[in-house]
Image (spheres, rainbow, N blue to C red):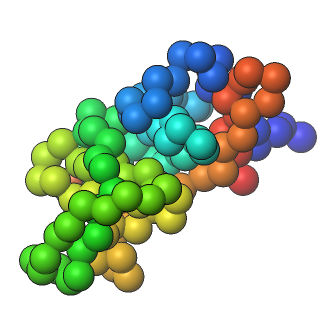
Amino acid sequence: MTSSVHDVGAEADFEVGQPRRVEIEGRGFVVVNGGSQFHAARDVCAHQGARLSSGRCKGNVHADSVGGHIEYQTGGRTLLQCPWHGWIFDMATGRALADPDRARVRVYPVQVTDGRVLLDLA
Ligand code: FES
């Protein structure tokens, strides 16, 4: 029986707010060190498939609705913006801010143990 937990690198190799792509068994994942917590998702945007690891982390953003007012807020969310068309995903839930009920990426639990970043694909 194989474990679903994969060591994807040293904690020190993940700069805060800098998305990083890792590959496990031929599949790509984006890992983000959000400062107080790590997050991971499939490295495939829910819109047209761009690599989210080529995007950038954003400040804290609140969107009223699709195409509606967007404002930056302080808070603890880790947000990642797709490099192609700018969709922004909450890395804790995988949901796109503009359409959270329909647009999302799959997220995975991450923990740091003894300085190692462990991604659980279960
Ligand atoms: S491919 Fe990501 S927003 Fe379009």
76 or 54, which lies in front? Answer: 76
Residue sitting at the far right: 1
Please tell me in which quarter of the rendered image ligand 1 is found: bottom left
Q: Is residue 37 left or right of residue 116?
A: left
Residue 10 coordinates in the image, percent (x, y): 64, 17
Residue 76 in the image, given as x and y percentages of width and height = 49, 56
User: In the picture, residue 104 is in which quadrant?
Assistant: bottom left
Circle count: 0
Res. 70 image quadrant: bottom left
In the figure, 21 relative to 10: above or below? Answer: below
Q: As displayed, is residue 55 above or below residue 99?
A: above
The image shows residue 44 at horizontal and vertical percentages of 35, 48
Q: Is residue 55 left or right of residue 113?
A: left
Q: Residue at x 89, y 40 (%)?
A: 1
Residue 105 appears in the picture as rendered: no
Q: Residue at x 16, y 53 (%)?
A: 86
Residue drawn 40% across the image and 68% down it:
95
75, above or below 8, in the image = below
**In the rendered image, is residue 2 in sight?**
yes
Residue at the (59%, 42%) spot, across then down: 36
Q: Is residue 2 left or right of residue 94?
A: right
